[in-house]
Image (cartoon, rainbow, N blue to C red):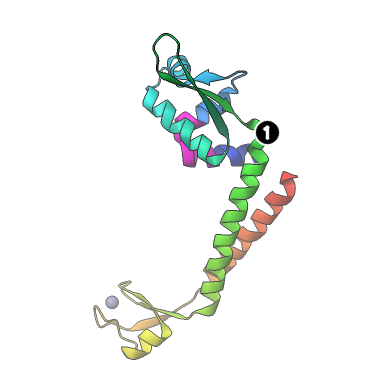
Amino acid sequence: MESDELIRELIERVAGDVGLIIYSLRPKKEFTDEQMSLELGTEINDIRRALFSLYELGLAEYRRKRDDETGWMEYYWKINYEKQNEVLRRELLKTKKKLEEKLEEEEMSVYYICVNGCVKISYEEAMECNFTCPRCGSMLEYFDTSVIIEKAKEEVTRIDEMLKNLK
Ligand SMILES: [Zn+2]
């Protein structure tokens, strides 16, 4: 996947459609919430929320300045396009770490599930209830995690490739 596509996906997830629109606008100079609100015809609160989400990601920054006329604090925003790869790398590494933890957990444990889908329990718990479901009394079946493990491994490989392409 291209890094542009990745960053769009991340922004949409964290800062929503409004965040994505602001990011795609590539504003040349600083702007206030109000200017952006007028330009996009979007509620100022939605603009602010999106901008602060971008800020938390590290993709936006602001400086505050008191407006001489109104005496109100104004936020002057700037989008950090040069941070894009750094932010992507951080997020990909975070996802990779989660996947690896999940992999470790799945590889270490043996699960049993109720044939009716009521419970998913450990081998020890399953033994304690004689391999019958504690809720409905049906038989418990061995739960094959190999598909989950395979998927997670593929995902880790995919992330590694994406990280390599970020350079
Ligand atoms: Zn059951």
Seen from the viewer's position, the closer of residues 1 and 32 is 32
* Residues shaded magenta: 9-19
> Where, by quadrant of the figure, is residue 96 drawn?
bottom right
What is the quadrant of the C terminus in the image?
Answer: top right
Q: Main secondary structure of the magenta part?
A: helix
| Picture coordinates of residue 58, whole percent (x, y) | 57, 39
SS at mark 1?
helix
What is the quadrant of the N terminus in the image?
Answer: top right
Determine if the magenta segment contains residue 16.
yes
Q: Is residue 1 visible?
A: no
The image shows residue 138, relative to residue 100, as above or below, that is below
> Where, by quadrant of the figure, is residue 98 drawn?
bottom right
Residue found 52% across the figure and 73% down from its top: 105
> Where, by quadrant of the figure, is residue 118 drawn?
bottom left
The residue to which callout 1 is attached is 82
Residue found 58% across the figure and 28% down from its top: 79
Kind of residue at disc 1: Glu
The image shows residue 131, relative to residue 44, as above or below, that is below
